[in-house]
Image (cartoon, rainbow, N blue to C red):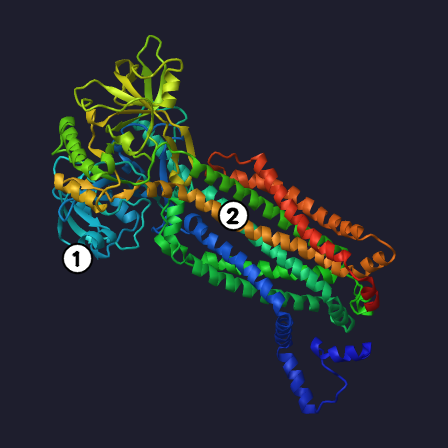
């Protein structure tokens, strides 16, 4: 066995110290001194990097585990950061997006003043560079196999200049297009150009005939002057047809001039509106909100929750690798002691360790960045569907940019610091002389290193528990949404929308006749004659209005008044609790009748039968209840549960109070069609509508069940996402607990052997390590409970039927994690009780 001096001599070269016991020729000494003068720091740098690389390569298992663990956490964080960057950080794809503000006329809860479009907004032109407004409209394009509904908008000149509108083919709207009378010039979207016109290269100059919702009397003749580029992005999807708005409009957005503050511009706007609109409340004011912040306002809580979850997973991964490094550093105490004994400074050793951390951190970040770039490809459409908001700039907004590269660079630096500080804790807190004398056997790590390791493990447990509780809340919320009875049956129902032009159907009688003919054509094609119409989409809440009983002491309620055909309840399988549906005579001129929901019946007639009673229903929310027409209640149906997932939020109105009136008594120009199990293809619905009247435009048919499922997908996907995060984090935390106890067993094998030799009970040995692991587990669980409360508050807007703090969920998840953590402690403790004392003492 080599002596201690021989081992020191053998290690001198690896420390980078020149051997002075060999003579050098004068030329060689001159060359060596010249090289040292030119760059000793560079040579030392190369030597330290080579040494760090060799050290990592000598332990490939540790390098693979550490790199993959960190890369998984980094890829997760960078992918989430790419989404957060697209919505919250990256500028909107408009010129001078930092000077683009949304105009909010009134504080929340206040109605907008009347006559805003008549105000002379040019008084603000010294502050505002571009005033941007649009009027959304539906363009019913005529011609072709069937009319097509194309969502579009009439826009102001500021829309073109302020949002940087450009044309991929043809030209943009010009000043003359906004002032010249006659057929309007329009631009069409790239998708409409490809879908309806097959990418016709001669599209520029082509005329279109279309009815528009705002001017429904006669078809418009539109001249296509340009095609929008495929990457053009707007806050809404009403861009298939873009035409000039030739009417006054108040600005929705403004681009402030350079050097103009939003507060001062808001004060000027408030003064302008007050001067033109007397009688405004004293607290009324106009506000200018950064447009990007307003666009992402509803999504911010959700994005913050997901970003926090991803950050917690990364912190757990870092803590796990730091614990591995602490264990590995404790095993390298002899190496570090020898280096210090040979004259290496602690600073030099720290530099060696920092290069090891740099290599591990750099490799992990590079791998994580590559994985993230693969994950974000093709993710844009899924993100838009789940969040309910269009990606600013399209899918390219998820591409790696300077923000993500800066985050990756920051990740390298942070990881290098973390991966360096962990072994440095051993270097600075451990006495090296005992390790040098004992050759590494029996030496114990310093108290500071043990304390740091315990803090890291407790932090892992806390973060994992917070994520587990958050995922449990979302799972329970998703289960509640899936099991909640919406009150109607969507399976097997196809639906589409139709719009009637004012010229052909100018009054209620003509519209009622058209709807009656449509139902006559649909019923033979439907299963069991189940075909119906309604004026409202069943998956969106209807603004309630005041209704009251026609009694001496009327009872009032706020109810959603929905116009439906007689077979609506039969088609959507909404069961009746009392009475029945409308009759064939319930049309224009017949007795006003109504079918109400059971909750509305209980609200208005708690002690009497609702069928046969009279209910006053105004024709609009501004009508006087005392002059409203009394409607006789002919039926009571099951409640339809309204759940609104709009704007990335989950809002449950519970069992909404509904009043259904006959569509054929008061038909409007727009309706939704429902057909149970149509015997032909979905496009057959549009063909059938076109056969009745070729100028009626129908929307794209879809399955009602698919629409219902899509409306629930966002919160459900968030639940699965958080569950995946929590499972990964919980696994890492349990592995960390296990590794700490297992390492403690390995380090204290001699002590355990001595205890067993002198008669200690194996159960006492198990209890010794269970107490150590239990203390870590208890501290982490206590901190995790507090973190779970914070996570629950962040998820509040996404929860359905679940409170942010559910004691049952918190207790159940904490208990389950405590059991798993106890098993992770018990397994290595059991191995400690099985140590062979003779082998341990013989090795010593």
Residue at image point 71% right, 59% down: 425
Which percent across, then down, holds residue 821? 66, 49
Q: Secondary structure at mark 1?
A: loop
Asked whether residue 600 is in view, the answer is yes
In the image, which disc is placed on residue 200?
1
Which percent across, then down, holds residue 634? 28, 19
Instruction: Specify the quadrant that holds the N terminus.
Output: bottom right
Which one is nearer the viewer's eye here, 218 or 413? 218
Tag 2–tag 1 contact (CB < 8 Å): no
Q: Earlier in the sequence, mark 2 or mark 1?
A: 1
Which percent across, then down, holds residue 504? 11, 34
Q: Is residue 630 above or below residue 783?
A: above
Instruction: Specify the quadrant that holds the C terminus.
Output: bottom right
Residue at image point 40% right, 15% down: 606
Circle 2 crowding by C-alpha within 10 Å: few under 14, some 14–19, many from 20: many
Asked whether residue 674 is in view, the answer is no
In the rendered structure, the answer to whether residue 365 lies left or right of residue 245 reads right
- Which residue matches tag 2? 723
Q: Secondary structure at mark 2?
A: helix
Q: Is residue 380 above or below residue 6?
A: above
In the image, which disc is placed on residue 96?
none
The residues bearing labels 2 and 1 have C-alpha atoms spaced at a distance of: 48 Å
Which one is nearer the viewer's eye here, 49 or 591? 591
Q: Is residue 360 above or below residue 678?
A: below
């Amino acid at each position: 066995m080599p002596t201690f001096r021989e081992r020191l001599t053998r290690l001198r070269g690896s420390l980078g110290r020149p051997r002075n016991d060999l003579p050098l020729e004068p030329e060689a000494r001159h060359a060596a001194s010249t090289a040292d003068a030119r760059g000793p720091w560079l040579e030392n740098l190369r030597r330290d990097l080579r040494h760090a690389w060799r050290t990592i390569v000598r332990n490939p298992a540790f390098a693979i585990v550490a790199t993959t663990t960190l890369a998984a956490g980094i890829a997760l964080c960078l992918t989430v950061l790419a989404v957060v960057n697209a919505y919250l950080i990256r500028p909107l794809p408009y010129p001078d997006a930092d000077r683009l503000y949304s105009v909010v006329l009134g504080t929340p809860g206040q109605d907008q003043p009347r006559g805003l479009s008549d105000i002379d907004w040019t008084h603000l032109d010294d502050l505002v560079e571009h005033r941007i407004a649009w009027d959304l409209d539906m363009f019913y394009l005529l011609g072709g196999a069937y009319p097509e509904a194309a969502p579009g908008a009439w826009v102001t000149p500021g829309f073109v200049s302020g949002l940087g509108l450009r044309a991929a083919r043809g030209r943009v709207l010009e000043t003359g297009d906004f002032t010249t009378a006659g057929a309007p010039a329009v631009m069409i979207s790239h998708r409409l150009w490809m879908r309806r016109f097959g990418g016709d290269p001669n599209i520029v100059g082509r005329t279109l005939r279309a009815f528009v919702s705002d001017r429904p009397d006669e078809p418009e003749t539109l001249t296509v002057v340009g095609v929008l580029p495929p990457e053009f992005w707007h806050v809404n999807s009403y861009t298939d047809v873009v035409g000039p708005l030739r009417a006054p409009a108040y600005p929705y957005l403004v681009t402030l001039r350079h050097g103009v503050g939003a507060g001062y511009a808001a004060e000027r706007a408030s003064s302008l509106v007050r001067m033109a609109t007397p009688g405004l409340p004293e607290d009324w004011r106009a506000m200018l909100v950064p447009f990007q912040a307003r666009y992402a306002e509803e999504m911010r809580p959700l994005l913050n929750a997901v970003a926090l979850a991803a950050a917690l997973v990364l912190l757990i991964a870092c803590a796990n690798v730091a614990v591995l490094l602490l264990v590995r550093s404790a095993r390298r105490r002899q190496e570090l002691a020898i280096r210090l004994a040979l004259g290496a400074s602690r600073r030099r050793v720290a530099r060696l360790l920092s290069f090891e951390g740099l290599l591990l951190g750099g490799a992990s970040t590079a791998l994580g960045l590559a994985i993230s770039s693969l994950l974000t490809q093709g993710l844009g459409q899924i993100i838009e569907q789940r969040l309910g908001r269009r990606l600013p700039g399209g899918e390219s907004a998820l591409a790696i940019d300077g923000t993500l590269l800066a985050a990756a660079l920051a990740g390298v630096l942070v990881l290098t610091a973390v991966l360096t500080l962990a072994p440095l804790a051993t270097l600075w807190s451990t006495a090296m002389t005992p390790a040098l004398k004992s050759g590494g056997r029996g030496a114990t790590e310093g108290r500071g290193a043990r304390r740091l390791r315990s803090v890291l493990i407790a932090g892992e447990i806390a973060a994992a528990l917070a994520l587990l509780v958050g995922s449990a809340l979302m799972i329970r919320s998703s289960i509640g949404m899936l099991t909640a009875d919406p009150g109607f049956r969507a399976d097997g129902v196809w639906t589409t929308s139709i719009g009637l032009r004012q010229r052909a159907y100018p009054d209620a009688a003509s519209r009622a006749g058209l709807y009656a003919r449509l139902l006559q054509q649909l019923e033979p094609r439907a299963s069991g004659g189940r075909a119906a119409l309604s004026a409202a989409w069943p998956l969106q809440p209807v603004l309630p209005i005041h209704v009251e009983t026609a009694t001496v002491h009327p009872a009032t309620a706020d109810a959603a008044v929905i116009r439906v055909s007689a077979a609506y309840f039969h088609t959507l399988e909404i069961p009746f609790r009392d009475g029945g549906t409308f009759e064939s005579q319930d049309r224009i001129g017949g007795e006003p009748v109504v079918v109400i929901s059971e909750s509305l019946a209980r609200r208005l007639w708690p002690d009497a039968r609702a069928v046969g009673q009279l209910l006053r229903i105004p024709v609009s929310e501004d009508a006087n209840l005392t002059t409203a027409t009394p409607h006789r209640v002919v039926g009571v149906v099951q409640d339809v549960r309204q759940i609104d997932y709009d704007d990335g939020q989950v809002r449950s109105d519970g069992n909404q109070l509904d009043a259904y009136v006959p569509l054929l008594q008061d038909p409007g120009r727009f309706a939704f069609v429902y057909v149970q199990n149509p015997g032909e293809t979905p496009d057959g619905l549009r063909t059938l509508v076109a056969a009745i009247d070729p100028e009626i435009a129908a929307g794209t048919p879809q399955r009602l069940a698919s629409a219902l499922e899509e409306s629930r997908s966002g919160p459900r996907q968030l639940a699965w996402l958080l569950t995946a995060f929590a499972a990964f984090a919980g696994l890492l935390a349990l592995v960390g607990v296990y590794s700490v106890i297992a390492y403690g067993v390995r380090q204290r094998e001699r002590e355990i052997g001595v205890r067993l030799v002198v008669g200690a009970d194996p159960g006492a040995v198990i209890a010794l390590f269970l107490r150590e692991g239990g203390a870590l587990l208890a501290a982490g669980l206590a901190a995790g409970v507090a973190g779970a409360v914070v996570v629950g508050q962040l998820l509040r807007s996404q929860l359905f039927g679940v409170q942010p703090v559910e004691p049952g969920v918190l207790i159940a998840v904490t208990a389950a994690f405590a059991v798993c953590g106890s098993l992770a402690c018990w397994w290595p403790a059991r191995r400690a009780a099985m140590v062979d004392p003779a082998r341990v003492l013989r090795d010593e």
